[in-house]
Image (cartoon, rainbow, N blue to C red):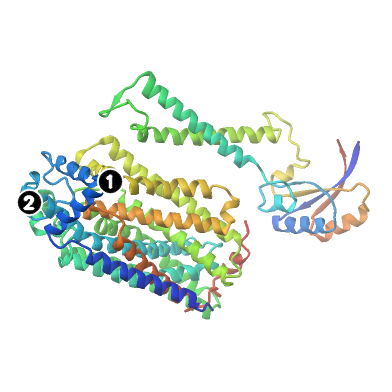
Amino acid sequence: MYKLSKNIKSISLAFIVLGLIGLVLGFSTTPHSIEDVKALEASHASHGGVHEATTDYHNGHAEPGHAHDDHNSHHSEVASHGTHSGNAHYEHVLHQYQNKPWAAIYVAAFFFFMIALGVLAFYAIQNAAQAGWSPILFRVMEGITAYLLPGGIIMFILLALSGFHINHLFVWMDADVVAHDELLQGKQGWLNVPFFLIRAAIYLALWNTYRYFAVKFSRNQDDDAQGNRWYKKSFKAAAIFLVVFIYTESMMSWDWIMSFDPHWFSTLFGWYVFASMFVSGITVIALITIVLKSQGYLTKVNNSHIHDLAKFMFGISIFWTYLWFSQFMLIWYSNIPEEVTYFITRINDFKLPFFGMVAMNFLFPVLVLINTDFKRINWLIVIAGIVILLGHYLDIYNMVMPATVGKSWFIGYAEIGALFFFLGLFIYIVFNALTKASLEPKGNPYLEESKHFHY
Amino acid sequence: MASKVIHAYYLDDEVLMDAVKALQIKHYHIEEVYTPFPVHGLDKLMGLPHTRLAICSFLYGLVGLTVAVTMMNFIMINDWPQNIGGKPSFSFLENLPAFVPIMFELTVFFAAHLMVITFYMRSKLWPFKKAENPDERTTDDHFLVEVDANGKDVEELQAFLQKTGAVEINLKDKAH
């Protein structure tokens, strides 16, 4: 049995407290009026004039056909947007600043939620494939998926807050914008708040149901190790879940992420988000396994298990890059205005996170983890894993921020605070869940094979 | 110089692995093991040095990448710039996304083909080469361990091999 160490408890608590402080600072430094924005821009301009250039670009961007290409034009004066006369620009920026702390919370909340979901998918695949190498790691995976329920509830609350107009993250939820936008009117059948929330509830209910039964069957197999009755049930549940998952995960990614840019669509977006959550999840499995092993638990986990996890980290990183590039290259090459705006916004306004993420998620893991021997060195895996996780945080950041915060982005109190807060919460919930059952799933028929796994 | 070797046959890779372990504990010298398929861990057990083929493959990949970059730069930018899909080829960097698939494919192509050729050369394999394995059954379902019997008590060695689960044991003269 694993016992929650004091260190982990205090670390998670420290992260939560630091995160809360960051969030409070993030919300309190948000400008409240146009005057605040003017003051802010003036101070920025006096610091070096960088912002001035972007402001110019912003005005220059107001060309014919722009009326709704800009993803950020969800303030009420859509019609007058083209001219930017008077205070329209400042009001626009004000809305972006007011979105910023909410978007920061949303990115961090989704990031940690997606880790739990990715691990759940990985766990289901191990069960459905009747994998022989991994049962020794099942309890680690079950522990990580414990964050699915609290993380899911947080996500649902955030979506509901947007739905009730507490924040303005989703453009299409704004009735004024929809009234002036034929494309959004056409999508109202899918993109309307009640149906949106019902769908979110359905996805979360389905995933959590599987999680509940998978863990229950796995624990039952411990107590009732005669025969494989519960094991077979796990297998069936996993197979059904995987079919349900790939549909619901796709729709979730359209709803929760792609609809930030409601004019834009990509047919492989679901896969793309899946690759991100899958590689983040596997990385977290590897990191937590290494942490537990360093504390003297999981004695039967040998470096062949670590090697396999590192291979997955390596392989799925490349898979993610493949999808990222497939999406990017086709849109870049065809250059259709309604599609390509998505990447133009990102390359013009988010150059560093956009290309930095490719370096962190592709170049770094490829170069570090390509060597067989390196895949067995724990500290290298930890370094690669942290870079991969930060890279995929940036990936989500790049999906959400351009449409909600636009050019007013920077990594400030709110972003770091939200990341710390959810990190602390995640660590606490996951490690607490690990104490609930023996770290070795006793009844699994493949346990012996897993213990002797050797490559 | 002719030398004496013992050929011991096994029917299962796990039994074979255990036999190899046992032989090494007794300090018998294993000349070679013939198996119908690659047995994981056997190379480590026999103390064979780690293959350097992977390093070669990485270098070949880099060669392929370089060839692709040079080739696309020459064809599409320097020699005959074309305007494809409203993207005139004036700069390699600005047209890079279109070249990435070619760069990837040539990297893989060079790494794979040159690695196979290197493997053939290192293993001294070429078309129509006469097979070296002493018994055809090692290409089907038998595992053969060739143990050096020079200066050893042959009776004792044979009895020992019997105990490790060998299904057939032959004493052979091996011509070098």
Q: If the image is split into quadrants, where does the C terminus of chain A sit?
A: bottom right
The type of residue carrying mark 2 is His
| Cα distance between the residues tagged 1 and 2 | 25 Å
> Residue A126, how many percent across, how many down?
48, 62
State which quadrant residue A333 falls in.
top left
Write down the residue under mark 2: A180
State which quadrant residue B96 falls in.
top left
Write down the residue under mark 1: A346
- As drawn, the residue found furthest toward the bottom would be A223
Disc 1 with disc 2 on a shared chain: yes
- As drawn, the residue found furthest toward the top would be B79
Q: Secondary structure at mark 2?
A: loop
Q: Residue, x 45% and y 45% (percent of image)?
A: A363
> Foreground: A287 or A37?
A37
> Foreground: A198 or B59?
B59
Q: Is residue A167 visible?
A: yes
State which quadrant residue B125 falls in.
top right
Q: To which chain does the residue with label 1 belong?
A: A
Judged left or right of residue A276, residue B164 is: right
> Residue A450, how many percent across, how many down?
58, 65
> Residue A157, how many percent across, how many down?
24, 70
